[in-house]
Image: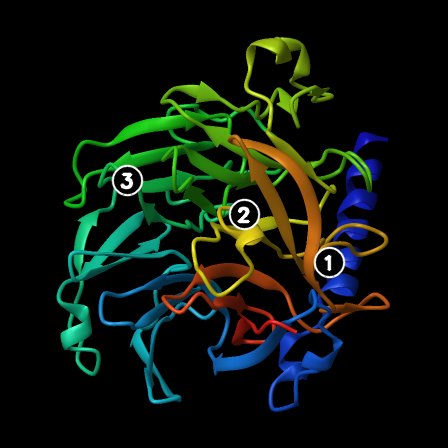
Amino acid sequence: MCAIKAFIRSVVALSLCCYVLPTAAQYQGRSLPLDKIKLPAGFSIDLWAEVPNARGLTLGKNGTVFAGSKEAGNVYAITDNGGTRQVRTLASGLNSPLGVAFRDGALYVSAVERILRFDGIEEKLDQPGKPVVITDSFPTEKHHGGKFIAFGPDGLLYVPVGAPCNICEPDPERFALIARIKPDGTSHEIYAYGVRNTVGFDWHPETKELWFTDNGRDWMGDNLPPDELNRAPAKGMHFGYPYCHAGDILDPKYGAKRDCGKLTAPVAKFDAHVAPLGMRFYTGKMFPPEYRNSIIVAEHGSWNRRNKIGYRLQLVRIKNNKVVKQEVFAEGWLQEQDVWGRPVDVLVMPDGALLVSDDYAGVIYRISYKKP
């Protein structure tokens, strides 16, 4: 009987996956329906660059936008010369290099078990050369193995390691965590525990505290558990996985092992299965003042829910270092259960505009504001 149930579950999972995620190639070479995107008054969205499977974003000192990818295995550099943008492929054939970070003239790239560094990258975009491997000590598991990376205010590179499963009890010193290392790859230490799969984090511009998104587990129903926004002001906090989800929901298998009250609850809950990925505090001056220091979150969208949800940008308003309101900032990539785009990461540009990567449509958008 157990074997039959397991088989049925696998068939359902496959059929749902195929139903929710039709081949992205359908949309290549076709005009994207940007007029379907709904934004607040005064905001507009434009196609900024075509970048296959664009994932994590970061900005170089000289204005180069770098983008990672997952399935494509490529790392890109996008330069803008008076409105004419050029997309270069810096590296290819890498193992899910979705995370990119920039510091002291060097580009750092995550590739599952490795962190690579391209020195002096903006001076040699056409011939970047071979990267330096600063570490290859992270787990090789590909399930939740892709890594968003970023440098914190402390000058350390923060590197998450997701759970190698949907739900399991992995080695807490190896999986379901956020680690940090020095720029040369040394001094590895764990900063946060119990993190199932974060693919986006940022530091509050004033308090310098780490905030991060986390994707909840699957197969607890269409509406459980909520995805999470977390705050980690100190090292060593535990955020629940695999014992407690969204702060107070006991896992059916592992929940009896820990007291949820002694673990760290999220500061905000998103709808279940929206898949919150990239997030940034808005620090620009283009948008209206009330947007400053709010969080913009890219919801990649559900893959195993009967009715799709997510596929949008969410705005999380902060006051006195606490979440006071959530609202949809941009939506329209989901049209009557038909998906044509999936936001992944966001990046605030020097002029205050917001770039948004979309791995499904293979593009980067630019969202700008002019007073109505």
Q: Is residue 295 above or below residue 287?
A: above
Which sits in the foreground, 115 or 261? 261
As shown in the figure, which amino acid type bears the numbered disc 1? Cys
The N terminus: image quadrant: top right
Which sits in the foreground, 226 or 23? 226
Q: Is residue 106 left or right of residue 55?
A: left
Mark 2 and mark 1 lie on one chain; the one further toward the N terminus is 1
Which sits in the foreground, 251 or 2? 251
Mark 1 and mark 3 lie on one chain; the one further toward the N terminus is 1
Which x, y percent locates residue 57?
A: 41, 62
Q: Is residue 288 left or right of residue 34?
A: left
Q: Is residue 160 left or right of residue 290?
A: left
Q: Is residue 202 above or below residue 370?
A: above
As shown in the figure, which amino acid type bears the numbered disc 3? Pro
Query: Residue 370 is drawn in which quadrant?
Result: bottom right
Mark 2 residue element: strand
Mark 2, Cα crowd under 10 Å, few <14 / some 14-19 / many 20+, is many
Q: Which residue is mark 3?
A: 153
Q: Closer to the observer: label 2 or label 1?
A: 2
Q: Is residue 217 visible?
A: no
Q: Is residue 356 visible?
A: yes
Name which residue lies at 71% across and 36% down: 226
Name which residue lies at 54% across and 41% down: 213
Query: Residue 336 is drawn in which quadrant?
Result: bottom right
The C terminus: image quadrant: bottom right
Q: Which residue is mark 2?
A: 295
Which numbered circle lies on residue 17?
A: 1
Mark 1 residue element: helix
